[in-house]
Amino acid sequence: YSAYLYLAMSNYAESNGFKGISNWFIVQSQEELDHAMKFYNYVHSMGETLELGAIDKPEPRWNSIIDVFENGLTHEKYVTQRIHKLMDIAHEVKDYAAISMLQWFVNEQIEEESSFRDILDKLKLTGGDVNYLMVLDGELGQRVRTPPQSETNE
Ligand code: FE
């Protein structure tokens, strides 16, 4: 769902003339798919299987590009809560393998929230000035996907 939500945000940015921000969200969307695969691979490596469920349709109810990033930050905070909840359960049942796997996600969520916060701070600093917004858009257009470790090792 995170990947799908960020694709919707990319779509919004692209439609509103923010090509760089659109690129940033495409990369963000790809990274969320990588994260989903981390769970997928973990479950299989433990000899278990998964049931694939339906993915909700993202509802693009954003009024501005700041609104998009506010919503993204809110979403990441929600994901952080879900990861922490999984960690609580792993501790309850003393599942040390899960604890180790989930620790990666705990650390990742710190970065996720922080990157949304940083961009939000910069967006607010532009004060809506188009020239500054375009500089920031250009900066975010530089983002490229970093393939996960498992892919680079192969
Ligand atoms: Fe995320």
Image (cartoon, rainbow, N blue to C red):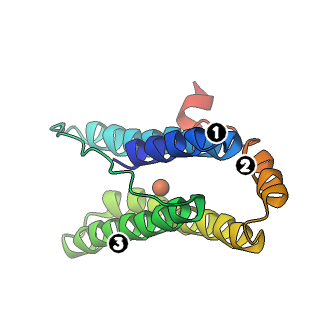
Which residue is situated farthest in the top direction here? 154
- Residue drawn at x 34%, y 46% as measured from the top left: 39
Q: Is residue 120 above or below residue 144?
A: below
Q: Is mark 3 on a helix, strand or loop?
A: helix
In the image, 24 versus 137, the foreground residue is 137
Quarter of the rendering containing residue 112: bottom right
Count residues near mark 3 (Cα–Cα under 10 Å), then give few for <14, some for 14-19, many for 20+.
Answer: some
Vertical order, 121 against 44 (above or below): below
Residue highlighted by disc 3 = 81
Q: How crowded is mark 2: few (under 14 residues within 10 Å), some or many (20 or more)?
A: some
Element under label 2?
helix
Cβ atoms under marks 1 and 2 closer than 8 Å: yes
Circle 2 residue: 140
Residue 108 numbered tag = none
* Mark 2 or 3, nearer chain start: 3
Given residues 15 and 100, the one toward you in this image is: 15
In the rendering, at what x and y percent does residue 57 appear? 27, 44
Q: Which amino acid lies under the numbered mark 3 shown in the image of this protein?
A: Gln
Tell me residue 87's x, y (percent). 32, 69
Amino acid type at mark 2: Leu
Residue hosting label 1: 23
- Whether label 3 touches label 1, CB < 8 Å: no
Q: Can you say whether 18 is above or below 113 in the image?
A: above
